[in-house]
Image (spheres, rainbow, N blue to C red):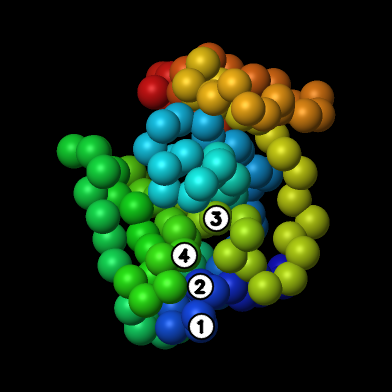
């Protein structure tokens, strides 16, 4: 299994994932759009598989009462999203150093998508949230 290394734009925050990555989910909700400037494209991994090698300026913002968003306090790079109490963390795919080999799995909160772009490709599109794991309820 390959290590997947990444970090923020200025290099103050560095991380490595030593374990499998899920395929990509695109989130088009208003919070993700405001944080990233378009939409949030993230993979997910087990929390035990990610190591923050250089936390540098890693900060967490509570955008809701159920999750935190990790970002670099120096350059502003969006890096992580984690629901409270979960053993998994979402990682922005653009933060990885090398191509990931991942594919787009699906898009969520498409009802919130603005009118200035279209979602391309054949990946399913859900108007609201959708669980990656079939046993979980939709969010």
Disc 3 marks which residue? 92
Marks 2 and 4 close (CB-CB < 8 Å)? yes
Task: Give the quadrant of the N terminus.
Answer: bottom right
Q: Secondary structure at mark 2?
A: loop
Where is 7 relative to 68, above or below? Answer: below
Q: Residue at x 54, y 24 (%)?
A: 113
Left or right position of 13 against 24: left
Cα distance in 3D space between marks 2 and 4 = 5 Å
Residue occupied by mark 4:
77
Label 1 to label 4, Cα distance in Å? 10 Å
Of labels 3 and 1, earlier in sequence is: 1
* Residue 94 vs residue 66, the one in the foreground: 94
User: Could you say which is closer to the camera, residue 38 or residue 86?
Assistant: 38
Q: In the rendered structure, are the residues bearing label 2 and label 3 in contact, judged by CB atoms less than 8 Å apart?
A: no
Residue 69 x/y as whole percent: 34, 53
Give coordinates of residue 127: x percent, y percent: 53, 15
User: Where's residue 15, x and y in %?
Assistant: 50, 75
Q: Which residue is mark 1?
A: 11
Residue neighbourhood size for the residue with mark 2, other residues' Cα within 10 Å, grouped as few (<14), some (14–19), many (≥20): many
Q: Are marks 3 and 4 in contact (CB under 8 Å)?
A: yes
**SS of the residue under disc 3:** strand
Asked whether the viewer can see residue 79, the reply is yes
Q: Are marks 1 and 2 in contact (CB under 8 Å)?
A: yes
Q: How far apart are the alpha carbons under marks 2 and 3?
A: 10 Å
Q: Is residue 137 above or below residue 85?
A: above
Residue at the front extreme, as displayed = 116
Q: Which numbered dot is residue 8? A: 2
């Amino acid at each position: 299994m390959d290590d997947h290394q990444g970090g923020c734009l200025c290099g103050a925050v560095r991380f490595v994932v030593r374990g499998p990555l899920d395929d990509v989910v695109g989130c088009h909700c208003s919070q993700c759009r405001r944080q990233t400037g378009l939409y949030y494209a993230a993979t997910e991994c087990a929390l035990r598989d990610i190591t923050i090698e250089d936390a540098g300026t890693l900060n967490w913002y509570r955008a809701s009462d159920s999750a935190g968003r990790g970002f670099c306090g120096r350059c502003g790079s969006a890096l992580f999203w984690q629901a409270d109490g979960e053993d998994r963390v979402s990682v922005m795919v653009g933060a990885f150093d090398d191509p990931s080999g991942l594919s787009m799995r699906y898009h969520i909160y498409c009802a919130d998508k603005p009118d200035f772009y279209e979602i391309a490709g054949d990946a399913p599109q859900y108007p609201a949230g959708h669980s990656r794991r079939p046993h979980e309820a939709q969010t």
